[in-house]
Image: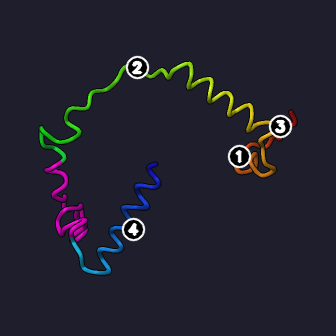
Amino acid sequence: MIKACVVLHNFLKSEAEKGNDSVYCPPGYADRIENGEIVEGEWRREASLEHSAFGEIERSMNRNYSHEAFTVRETFVDYFSTVGSVPWQAERAGINEIYDQ
């Protein structure tokens, strides 16, 4: 998910630069370097506002997932480690041991 967001961000920035369109990221909005110094962008002021979208998010103490989610995960692990495996998956995952189940 994060990688997809970064790719989309980079695409929007590159498209805006091609057409000099500054709607996505207007001048002065992002941090920049001037004369070797970091100049903070306008986004920082917006991000620190009391009523920002992130201001009301509270940390959840519950880090446990449901039994159903655990069961689905284990089913996938069992399948993709045995009959659903492909020859290259262990190498790509950095696992030296090949599972012969």
Q: Are marks 1 and 3 in contact (CB under 8 Å)?
A: no
> Hey, what amino acid is under mark 4?
Phe
Q: Whole-percent x and y of residue 39?
A: 19, 62
User: Marks 4 and 1, Cα distance to the nearest angstrom?
Assistant: 30 Å
Residue 40 within the magenta-colored segment of the rendering: yes
Identify the mark nearer the N-term, 2 or 4.
4
Please state, as top left, top right, bottom left or bottom right, where the C terminus lies in the image: top right
Q: Which mark is residue 4?
A: none
Q: Which mark is residue 99?
A: 3
Around disc 4, counting alpha carbons within 10 Å, would you say few (fewer than 14), some (14 to 19), or many (20 or more)?
few
User: Marks 2 and 4, Cα distance to the nearest angstrom?
Assistant: 36 Å
Around disc 1, counting alpha carbons within 10 Å, would you say few (fewer than 14), some (14 to 19), or many (20 or more)?
few
Q: Nearer the viewer, residue 39 or 63?
A: 63
> Which residue lies at the image location 28% right of the left edge and 81% below the top edge?
19
Instruction: Please tell me whether mark 1 sits on a helix, a strand or a loop.
Output: loop
Around disc 2, counting alpha carbons within 10 Å, would you say few (fewer than 14), some (14 to 19), or many (20 or more)?
few
Question: Residue lying farthest right?
Answer: 100
> Which residue lies at the image location 17% right of the left edge and 66% below the top edge?
28
Q: Nearer the viewer, residue 53 or 72?
A: 72
